[in-house]
Image (cartoon, rainbow, N blue to C red):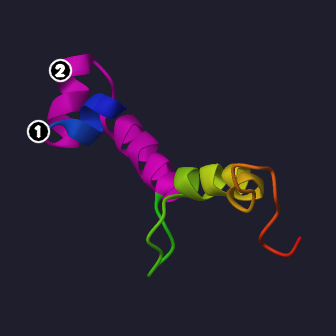
Amino acid sequence: MQIALRSSNTISEVGRKLDINPETLRGWVKKHKQRNESPAGASLSPDERARLKELKPFSCVDHEGEDYCGG
């Protein structure tokens, strides 16, 4: 999958080189892009959003453990 995404070759060329049906590879690439693309106008990827959500509880605590976000 990553080879097809990073290659300057077409999906058909990559598929032939890897002995994978080009249409199968094209479908995998399409699904990958749909799952990983950001909504229109969004500046963060889905992975970045998930990471931000994980870190958010820690962002409101100063070095002395004081909560300054009002929570």
Nearer-the-camera pick, 21 or 67? 67
Residue 8 location in percent, x, y?
10, 41
Q: Residue furthest bottom?
A: 41
Residue 42 location in percent, x, y?
48, 75
Q: Are marks 1 and 2 in contact (CB under 8 Å)?
A: yes
**Residue 4 colored magenta?**
no
Q: Which stretch appears magenta?
A: 8-36
Quarter of the view holding residue 1: top left
Query: Eyeballing the image, is 35 above or below 4?
Result: below
Q: Residue furthest left?
A: 8
Query: Magenta part mainly helix, strand or loop?
Result: helix
* Mark identifier at residue 9: 1
**70 sits left or right of 60 in the view:** right
Q: Nearer the viewer, mark 1 or mark 2?
A: 1
Q: Earlier in the sequence, mark 1 or mark 2?
A: 1
Type of amino acid at the residue the image marks with label 1 = Asn
Mark 2: which secondary structure?
helix
Within 10 angstroms of label 1, few (less than 14), some, or many (20 or more) residues? few
Within 10 angstroms of label 2, few (less than 14), some, or many (20 or more) residues? few
